[in-house]
Image: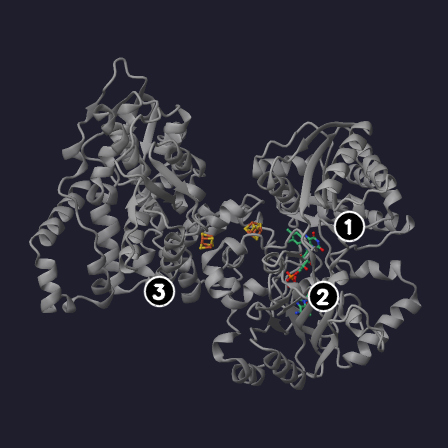
């Protein structure tokens, strides 16, 4: 280790290498409950060349590498593995260029997601993927997790906006994949391999993103319901009416209570579900769609609809949803959030199943999520220090995963597999698919040093 | 209030390390290192509480590097009580003697155990300082280089020493004043320590504003320090002692409200209940005290402040408002000072970007961490100048001094003023119109 530390200090400067326990403890976790592991060192490179040099040295000394963005991941992707070097990308945070002529943006991997959208906004442009963590998360982490957001229904996920990547491979070589062309079928689409690869195949050192014109108008509404099924039926009806709003997000009763407790914005506390609906685009179309959505909601059991009067109120309402996960932590010491996703027509069934399962195991759960995408975040409120209760939590999670797969769903819609969902991956994939993934991992990283043990064992 | 981190395990566990507090933390923004972020500091405290980390010099330094601005507490959806955590962590650093050095111990003893425990001694020191400044000796000493005999840290501080006012609060405010009969409310006015030495005129303004709003104002001439300095600097026992003295001096059952006009003091003053929870003789009264404690702006809005009929001066003013951390994050008083400013004739308000970002004053932070403090001040001053306001309003003596100096150093003509001063001037000019 000492030899590696010397190398790293050479490459990046002594003040960019941490190895004291007091400096390392704050890098021993990400946003995931229960997972903790100390790294051996953390380094903060300032250029692609420095990243490549760090990778070469670590490989030379046989030290595993974990790449870290902002550490907001919810599956343990950037949690260290024993004795590893953490390469932290936060000092590579520049937004390099916005090109309004071809609607692209080039940035370093440590750039904050919200800053990217703000930079685009200065040119009247728009970067749509907006994970709940967008003010904190890095674009590198978003690409590595293929993160979704609140606008996924209309605008898709991170993958839909990645045109090119610069990647440092596990042997320290630097490769540039993709380009600024709208169309490109030369060779395999290698950039796609790295999107969602959770830091196991390479380190992203630059991204080229596609932008859209910024929508001219936006309407945000919050509908309250006495029954969760009615919110789910509203979503189906809106989609069946051939409206694609940018956002259809829901909160259940427990989540509403916690969010209101934090933000005090006057959410109704006596309803079973809130549906956050947002439509954006041309002002005339937005007005039409908003009126139609309101009508559909009311005819499907909505008790009341609050319409944001201005941008500030719209922001307040959508922040309520963004804070949902952390706000749930007000109730109990540990919050374990899941990310199961089912085909949209199975949503109501899944929501009901989650509630029954929690009750059967005598557990507290708050559920929120991307209703329009079929992506649910059942969040168990528990205490990781109570082993008996944790046993019941894991039984409940198992049941939820099995039900999800039986409904044709996936164990994770956007948070990634990492460590937290690794045990369930073989339930979703047949052996041939798992082997294919392993073949790819082995051919790129034969020494298994890049985020080893994440997603699957190799 | 807990004395060791071990007692706060449940509070520590409440942090789910989601990172939503990172973008509001000034020290993380400056360093980009998790150790200097709220969740990083909490993780270190957790490790100390779990005996996984033997706290050493770096831990002590990091707890001292925190501004205590509490922006993280406002941002945290999980409701983590960061204020208690950082106070307790600092108490633990002190009891373990991690910061000890002979000269630090001397100054700490002088400030915490002597001056700020004894209001007479503090005023005496203030009087001496006033003489020194008035005589011009301060400038002469600096010119002759006598100040070079002082240790470096004090030398840097010496020119920063604020001008002591010509009269302290007790010379400006009668123990009981009233203007209407019968008065609508009976309130006690806290005069503070720095406020009393440097801004006694603002205490007078506060009394005038209360009088103009139908209050009978009780202002004991000699008031003990509220103890916030002690609580924030790892001396909880002294903080408790001061709290008891203040409760004895101003029994909460006798007043409709106890008014504080300093953001920093108020933030500490309204948590006596927690501080004295373990003291059977005082716990109940301390809770009553908390329920009566009001920041002046909060009180005025709550009781329906009477809008002044006159403008504070002939020329129109453009005012921008800087949030004191302990008013905005510690007491959640954000909209009230702005509403008061908006209601004053002749005043146009403009909003300040990053208004609730710490100015770097942070109690004695500008003394203990001059570089970080200067970086934050420059950032703030840049924003203020960018608004093209004629006046910067704020409601905390520390911010007031820090920003007045920062603006002067930057050669800016923007004037510092407190919302109550504008209000008081406006009320006083009513009879002229
Ligand atoms: C409150 C909260 C709300 C959230 N809301 C959402 C949401 O709405 N939608 C959603 O999808 N997710 C959400 N997340 C999860 C998380 O924010 C995302 O997964 C995010 O993309 C992680 O970014 P990060 O910079 O924090 O990455 P990290 O957590 O540091 O890392 C995540 C993974 O990416 C890898 N990685 C990071 N940078 C690089 C790089 N430069 N090159 C290669 N690999 C890299 C790491 O090794 C790790 O495997 C939320 C999290 C929180 C705490
Ligand atoms: S203090 Fe609050 S916002 Fe910050 S990491 Fe902990 S839970 Fe999240
Ligand atoms: S109190 Fe201020 S400086 Fe300290 S951790 Fe919180 S936000 Fe950062």
What residue lies at 78% left-to-right and 32% top-to-bottom? A297
- Whole-angstrom CA distance, mark 2 to mark 3, is 37 Å
- Residue furthest to the left in view is B135
Question: How busy is the neighbourhood of tag 1: few (under 14 within 10 Å), some, or many (20 plus)?
Answer: some
Q: Is residue A298 visible?
A: yes
Left or right, A381 with reference to B215: right
Disc marking residue B283: none
Q: Chain of mark 1?
A: A
Ligand 1 has an atom within 8 Å of the beta carbon of the residue at disc 1: no
x, y (%) of residue A361?
78, 40
Residue A452 location, quadrant: bottom right
Instruction: Tell me the SS state at disc 3.
Output: helix
What residue lies at 17% left-to-right and 27% top-to-bottom? B174
Q: Which residue is mark 1?
A: A154
Question: How busy is the neighbourhood of tag 3: few (under 14 within 10 Å), some, or many (20 plus)?
Answer: few
Residue A192 location, quadrant: bottom right
Ligand 1 has an atom within 8 Å of the beta carbon of the residue at disc 2: yes
- Whole-angstrom CA distance, mark 1 to mark 3, is 48 Å
- Whole-angstrom CA distance, mark 2 to mark 1, is 22 Å
Q: Nearer the viewer, residue B421 or A368?
A: B421
Where ligand 1 lies, by quadrant?
bottom right
Disc marking residue A144: 2
Q: Is residue B273 visible?
A: no
Question: How busy is the neighbourhood of tag 2: few (under 14 within 10 Å), some, or many (20 plus)?
Answer: many
Left or right, B307 with reference to B102: right
In the picture, the quarter occupied by the C terminus of chain B is top left
Instruction: Tell me the SS state at disc 1.
Output: helix
Instruction: Tell me the SS state at disc 2.
Output: helix
Closer to the chain start, of discs 2 and 1, is 2
């Amino acid at each position: 280790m000492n030899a590696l530390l010397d190398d790293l200090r050479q490459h990046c400067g002594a003040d960019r290498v941490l190895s004291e326990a007091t400096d390392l403890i704050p890098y021993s976790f990400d946003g995931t409950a229960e997972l903790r592991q100390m790294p051996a060192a953390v380094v903060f490179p300032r250029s692609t060349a420095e990243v490549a040099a760090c990778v070469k040295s670590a490989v030379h000394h046989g030290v595993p590498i974990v790449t870290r963005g902002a550490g907001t991941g919810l599956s343990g992707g950037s949690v260290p593995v024993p004795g590893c070097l953490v390469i932290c990308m936060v000092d590579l945070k520049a937004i390099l260029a916005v090109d309004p002529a071809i609607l692209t943006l080039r940035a370093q991997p440590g750039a904050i997601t919200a800053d990217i959208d703000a930079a685009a906004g200065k040119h009247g442009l728009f970067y749509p993927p907006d994970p709940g963590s967008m003010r904190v998360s890095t674009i590198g982490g978003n690409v590595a997790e293929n993160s979704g957001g609140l606008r996924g229904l209309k605008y898709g996920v991170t993958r839909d906006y990645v045109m090119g990547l610069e990647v440092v491979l596990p042997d320290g070589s630097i490769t540039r994949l993709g380009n600024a062309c709208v169309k490109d079928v030369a060779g395999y689409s290698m950039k796609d391999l790295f999107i969602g690869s959770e830091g196991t195949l390479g380190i992203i050192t630059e991204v080229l993103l596609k932008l859209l014109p910024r929508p001219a108008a936006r309407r945000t509404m919050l509908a309250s319901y006495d029954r969760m099924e009615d919110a789910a039926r509203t979503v189906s009806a809106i989609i069946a009416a051939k409206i694609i709003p940018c956002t259809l997000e829901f909160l259940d009763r427990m989540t509403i209570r916690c969010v209101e407790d934090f933000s005090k914005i006057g959410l109704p506390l006596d309803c079973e579900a809130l549906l956050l609906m947002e439509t954006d685009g041309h002002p005339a179309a937005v007005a039409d769609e908003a009126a139609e959505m309101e009508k559909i909601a009311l005819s499907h059991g909505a008790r009341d609809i609050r319409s944001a009067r201005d941008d500030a109120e719209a922001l307040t309402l959508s922040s309520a949803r963004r804070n949902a996960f952390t706000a749930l932590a007000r109730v109990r010491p540990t919050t374990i959030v899941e990310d199961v996703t089912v085909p949209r027509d199975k949503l109501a069934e899944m929501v009901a199943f989650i509630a029954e399962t929690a009750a059967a195991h005598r557990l507290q759960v708050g559920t929120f999520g991307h209703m329009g995408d079929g992506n649910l975040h059942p969040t168990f409120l528990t205490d990781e220090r109570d082993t008996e209760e944790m046993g019941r939590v894991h039984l409940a999670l198992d049941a939820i995963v099995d039900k999800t797969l039986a409904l044709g769903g996936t164990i994770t819609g956007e948070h990634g597999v990492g460590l937290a969902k690794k045990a369930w991956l073989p339930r979703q994939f047949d052996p041939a698919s798992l082997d294919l993934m392993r073949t790819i991992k082995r051919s790129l990283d034969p020494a298994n040093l890049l985020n080893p043990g994440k997603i699957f064992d190799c | 209030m807990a004395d060791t981190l071990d007692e706060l395990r449940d509070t520590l566990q409440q942090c789910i390390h989601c990172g939503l507090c990172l973008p509001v933390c000034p020290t993380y923004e400056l360093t980009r290192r998790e150790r200097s972020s709220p969740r990083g500091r909490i993780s270190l405290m957790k490790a100390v509480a779990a005996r996984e980390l033997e706290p050493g010099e770096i831990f002590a330094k990091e707890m001292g590097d925190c501004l205590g601005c509490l922006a993280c507490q406002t941002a945290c959806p999980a409701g983590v009580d960061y204020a208690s955590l950082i106070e307790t962590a600092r108490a633990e650093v002190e009891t373990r003697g991690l910061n000890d050095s002979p000269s630090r111990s001397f100054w700490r003893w002088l400030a915490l155990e002597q001056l700020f425990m004894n209001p007479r001694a503090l005023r005496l020191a203030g009087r001496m300082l006033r003489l020194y400044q008035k005589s011009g000796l301060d400038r002469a000493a600096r010119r002759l280089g006598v100040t070079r005999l002082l240790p470096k840290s004090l030398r840097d501080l010496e020119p920063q020493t604020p001008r002591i006012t010509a009269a302290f609060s007790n010379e400006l405010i009668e123990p009981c004043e009233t203007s209407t009969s019968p008065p609508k409310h009976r309130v006690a006015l806290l005069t503070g320590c720095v406020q009393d030495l440097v801004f006694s005129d603002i205490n007078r303004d506060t009394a005038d504003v209360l009088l103009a709003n139908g209050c009978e104002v009780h202002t004991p001439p000699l008031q003990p320090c509220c103890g916030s300095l002690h609580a924030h600097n790892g001396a909880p026992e002294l903080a408790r002692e001061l709290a008891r003295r203040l409760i004895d001096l101003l029994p909460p059952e006798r007043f409709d409200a106890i008014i504080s006009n300093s953001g920093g003091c108020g933030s500490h003053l309204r948590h006596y209940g927690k501080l004295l929870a373990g003291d059977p003789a005082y716990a109940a009264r301390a809770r009553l005290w908390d329920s009566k404690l009001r920041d002046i702006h909060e009180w005025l809005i709550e009781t329906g402040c009477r809008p002044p009929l006159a403008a504070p001066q002939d020329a129109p003013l453009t005012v921008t408002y800087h949030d004191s951390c302990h008013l905005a994050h510690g007491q959640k008083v954000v909209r009230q000072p702005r509403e008061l400013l908006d209601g004053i004739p002749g005043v146009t308000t403009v909003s300040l970007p990053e208004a609730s970002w710490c100015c770097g004053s942070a109690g004695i932070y500008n003394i203990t961490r001059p570089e970080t403090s200067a970086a934050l001040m420059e950032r703030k001053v840049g924003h203020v100048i960018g608004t093209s306001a004629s006046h910067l309003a704020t409601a905390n003596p520390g911010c007031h001094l820090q920003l007045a100096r920062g603006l002067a150093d930057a050669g800016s003509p923007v004037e510092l003023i407190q919302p109550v001063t504008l209000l008081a001037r406006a009320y006083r000019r009513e009879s002229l119109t």
